[in-house]
Amino acid sequence: MKIEFYGASGCVTGSSHFLKVKDKNILLDCGMYQGRDEKERGNETFNFNPKDVDYVILSHSHIDHSGRIPLLYKQGFKGDVICTEGTKDLCSVMLSDSGHILESEVEWKNRKRARQGLPPLEPLYTEKIANVAMYLFNGYPYDQWIELFDGFKIRFRDAGHLLGSAIIEMLIEDNKKQIKLVYTGDLGNKNIPILKDPTIIDYADYLIMETTYGNRLHTSISSELTDLAKIIKSTFKRGGNVIIPSFAVGRTQEVLYTLNNYVENNILKGVSVYVDSPLASESTAIFSRYHKYYDEEAQEILSKGSDPLSFPGLTFTKSPEESAKLNKVQSGAIIISASGMCEAGRIKHHLKHNLWRKESSIIFVGYQAEGTLGRSIVDGAKKVKLFGEEVVVNAKIYNLHGLSGHADRDGLVEWLEALKAKPEKVILVHGDTEAQESFNELLLSKGYSTYIAKPGDTFTPELTPEKFSVVRNRILSVINSIEDLDSTDKELLIEKIREEIKDI
Ligand SMILES: [Zn+2]
């Protein structure tokens, strides 16, 4: 078997790792490049023939992991997309929204091109193609082994990063040799609202690991949440609005859950909260269908008959007219809008009407990729361009990255150290160079063997069952079951393993 690295190697967006197992070609994620990566690498072409791909195994629905599946389909992929049930449902709204955005962007460019006498451009894919591509999706529950073909089984484990997000365990068998490859996808931050903490995995022979915040420590979520309440109160006192650029799926629901808490506990009184993103409204409805994925705290709220994503004063705006009305609101509104990195969507209008006002606040609650409008605001730009017009930045800018959906450096290490044995190799992906190098050094100092994946690299894991897999699997089974055994059984089991090791 072989792994080829393309997207999210040496960068954060465009996740896509190509596995060759026996005669099958498998893509781990098929994400869109965003911001700087999009400009440098482009989304139009793949480094392989889409027709040759048999499976896409999808870790979660974020566009930087799923966004190029419709393009893959458009260019000839007719295999299966394998993901969790939640990811499938979220993709059905997110990919169609992505198609819609791509179409409108091209429409806008083409009007300009027509005036310049240039031929029209084609969108990467349309909303319609995205909808048709959904027929390739197969949703599965967590924690269940799925045999995709002879000698290749996978299992999704809750990654705690987004509703439906998964760590992917892959058991590969060839000639009675076996290895377990694990792909973390994006690993969640502990204690984020609604979601469970990332699942601890037994072991991995080879681990492909994300490193988004490999060099950063988040402030604690609870202090960030207290800050959020304070910022809202002080902004309203100044007579401004609170604008929250937010990923429509995931972060928006977490923010709503938090605001619901404030309202229920009288921390905020009489607030007007607007979710101004059709995608955010649709995905909030999907969240409400997946209570089984909620963590204990959210389950408790549900058991009291209350909906943690709904409260008095909350409005989901639908039409563009309703959205435009918000431009006239001078103060007292919390507007949550997408896209999260301010590159597209209704958020740009809210920024245009609030960025220049010192009374207003802009609160960032998610990762801002390099080269995006969101990133330049977070980095302290004094002026930005919106709809071809220069807008001065006078509003107060906050960056609550403690609310991030990604584990920070310590979270990543804690998850890794919970494995019962060190992997043969920890392959680092999904991180900017600085984050990766710093995280790499830390892992080396802890005795891990590592590999930083660069775009175009090929990695060949070794299948060495005689030395590792058999013994390791037996020992793991003892570790897992020994607690429940009485002492005679324990001795019998240990004796049996001793015999097996001798045989090997
Ligand atoms: Zn993600």
Image: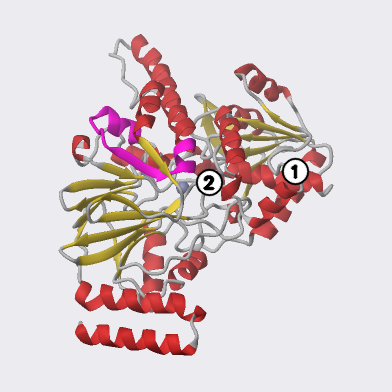
The numbered dot on residue 371 is none
Q: Which mark is residue 306?
A: 1
Q: Residue 229 vs residue 124: left or right?
A: right
**Is residue 79 within the magenta segment?**
yes
Closer-to-camera residue (134/334): 134
Q: Is residue 272 above or below residue 145?
A: above
Relative to 105, is 367 above or below? below
Q: Does the numbered disc 1 mark a residue whose Cβ is under 8 Å from ligand 1?
A: no
Locate the C terminus and report the quarter of the image it occupies.
bottom left
Q: Is residue 141 above or below residue 107?
A: below
Task: Give the image location of residue 408, x and y in percent.
Answer: 51, 61
Looking at the rendered structure, the secondary structure element under dot 1 is: loop
In which quadrant of the rendered view does residue 153 lie? bottom left
Q: Identity of the amino acid at label 2?
A: Leu
Amino acid at dot 1: Ser
Q: Is residue 463 above or below residue 254?
A: below
Residue pointed to by mark 2: 163
Q: Nearer the viewer, residue 469 or 413?
A: 469
Find residue 269 and report its horizontal and vertical position in percent. Answer: 84, 41
Answer with left or right where residue 27 lies relative to residue 320.
left
Q: Secondary structure at mark 2?
A: loop
Q: Which residues are magenta?
A: 69-89
- Going from the N terminus, do you reach mark 2 or mark 1 first? 2
Asked whether residue 345 is in view, the answer is: yes
Q: Position of residue 247 (x, y in %)?
A: 54, 40
Q: For the point 20% across and 84% down, which residue is it?
A: 503
Q: Residues within 10 Å of mark 2 (few under 14, many from 20)?
A: many
